Image: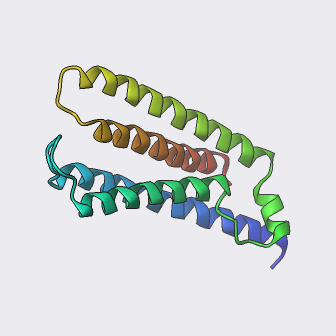
Amino acid sequence: MDTDEKAERIQRAAIRKMTVFAIAFVIWQLSYFTIARPPAGETVRNVDIVRTIGFLGWSAALLLLFAKGGGALAPKPVRAIIDDELARAQRAIAYRNGFWAMTLVNFLGYILAMTTQLRPIDLAHIGLSAGVLTVLVSQVLLARETGD
């Protein structure tokens, strides 16, 4: 199999994986708000700490996967093809979209926090989730649009 064919196969697999990761990420975020947590001011349980560390770890892993274009373990010639100018431009657009989504959600959360009893950790969670999810979805849509 030649390098171009291998690069194309890796890119298609990365798009499929990112789609699955985005769906799983949404499901996990929905579960975050449906599982009972201690009210504000009460002692944080160890399970809540582990869950939060898991969330942060998964968010970091998804962003790392995204930053590397899904081909971090591919041979160097394949990585060179995967990380072309178009791919870098698409990642920049996706990062920009994620930044604006996170900024907008945090702005709305700031306003909402004045009228509700939301905890700061919940607002931070919503903002980070919106940013990561927007980056993933934007990248998948951009890659599918260009046929990569």
Q: Answer left or right for 8 relative to 132.
A: right
Q: Answer left or right for 81 relative to 143.
A: right
Q: Residue at x 22, y 48 (%)?
A: 33
Q: How many marks?
A: 0
Q: Residue at x 75, y 66 (%)?
A: 7
Q: In the image shown, does 102 or 22 lie closer to the viewer?
A: 102
Considering only vertical position in the picture, is 42 above or below 1? above
Can you tell which quarter of the image residue 35 is in? bottom left
Q: Position of residue 78 (x, y in %)?
A: 80, 67
Q: Answer left or right for 55 relative to 11.
A: left
Quadrant where the N terminus sits is bottom right
Can you tell which quarter of the image residue 71 is in? bottom right
Quadrant where the C terminus sits is bottom right
Can you tell which quarter of the image residue 114 is in? top left
Q: Answer left or right for 71 relative to 1.
A: left
Q: Position of residue 93 (x, y in %)?
A: 63, 36
Q: Position of residue 126 (x, y in %)?
A: 35, 40
Considering only vertical position in the picture, is 110 above or below 52? above
Considering only vertical position in the picture, is 111 above or below 54? above
Hey, which residue is sitting farthest bottom in the picture? Answer: 1
Q: Position of residue 101 (x, y in %)?
A: 46, 32
